[in-house]
Amino acid sequence: MEGSEGSPRLDRVLAAHIGELSRSRLKALILAGQVFVDKAGGAVPVRDPAYHVARGDTIIIDVPEAADATPLGEDIALNVVYEDDDIIVIDKPAGLVVHPAAGHATGTLVNALIAHCGASLSGIGGVRRPGIVHRLDKDTTGLMVVAKNDHAHASLSAQFADHGRTGEMRRGYLAFVWGVPNRTRGTVDAPIDRHPHAREKMAVREGGRAAVTHYEVREVFNGHDGKPVASLLALQLETGRTHQIRVHLAHIGHPLLGDSVYGPHFKTKASQLGSQSQAALAELGRQALHAYLLALEHPRSGDVLHWESPLPEELLLLEKTVKAAL
């Protein structure tokens, strides 16, 4: 290093010298242990982007060859609810990422679909998202539809964009939340954008994209003191923003049980649950959200198709234990 790079931070020094790599890519290489400082005893990996670079330091970067962006089929079991030549509907389990992304290059729903459907999946979504017209978070369970050809992809994309305003598209969710909303039925109409500080999160922000969530209280659960502590809501979306349900429910003061991202300050409320409910929530280890309802017009026949998915076992156990405290 010549000493004329300005800031002595390692990531900024590298950015000043290596224009062909973005700063975020350089930071990722540093964190992955691919950047070394040549010391007297040999090259030592430096994993701190803020490492203070001294004048005269020799820095070595090991840039791995770019991985093939085309995902491969993998033998991952799928719970297929419906399938024909145009669409496939699956009941997604918790822990399954929908498509390859940073940190999840393999083991995704797309890898499973490629193995199951072969080359028939629609290519409109690009090589990393063949057939994908909507998503569920990694730890959200429930119904998803995938397009098996470009005609189906175009039809389904239009239906999802319309969100049932003029057609038959419906998406319903069941959510276990802390507390009980003041109204039995209500609507959360609040714009969503990236969180101003935590970029991996979303937040209700003025100037964000329009987002509308409708809810209905299905059941109220009391704690061991006999007072309401949680409730089961049925929700329908009028828009489809990233983390929309999680953000909106946290915004109105009723975050999802088990949501460590948008409801971490509600962890203390678990003490108001019975011991069995606390154990079930701890065992759940994720947000208590399930996509239970999907209705749409078939892309080719125009028939209205409707599916419902029961709560998975871990949410049934949570429901059973919180009911036991009634």
Image: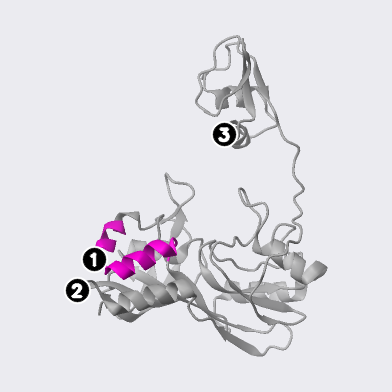
Give the CA separation, mark 3 to mark 2.
48 Å
Position of residue 308 measured from the top left corner of the image (x, y, whole percent): 54, 84
The answer to whether the residues at label 2 and label 1 have Cβ atoms under 8 Å apart is: yes
* Side of 181 relative to 56 (left or right): left
Residue in view at x 74 percent, y 82 percent: 84
Which mark sits nearer the N-terminus, 2 or 1? 2
Which mark sits nearer the N-terminus, 1 or 3? 3
Residue 22 shows in this picture: yes
- Amino acid on which the number 3 mark rests in the picture: Leu
Question: Which of labels 1 and 3 is toward the front?
Answer: 1
Give the labeled residue for mark 1: 272
Question: Which of labels 2 and 1 is toward the front?
Answer: 1
The crowding category of the residue bearing disc 2, from other C-alpha atoms within 10 Å (few below 14, some 14 to 19, many at least 20), is few
Residue 281 part of the magenta segment: yes
Give the CA separation, mark 2 to mark 1.
9 Å
Instruction: Please tell me whether mark 1 sits on a helix, a strand or a loop.
Output: helix
Report the residue that reaches farthest toward the right. 119
Give the labeled residue for mark 3: 31
Q: Which residues are magenta?
A: 266-287
- Amino acid on which the number 1 mark rests in the picture: Gln
Find residue 227 and name its label.
2
The crowding category of the residue bearing disc 1, from other C-alpha atoms within 10 Å (few below 14, some 14 to 19, many at least 20), is some
Which mark sits nearer the N-terminus, 3 or 2? 3
Q: Is residue 139 above or below residue 171?
A: above
- Based on the displayed image, in which of its 4 quarters is residue 175 positioned? bottom left
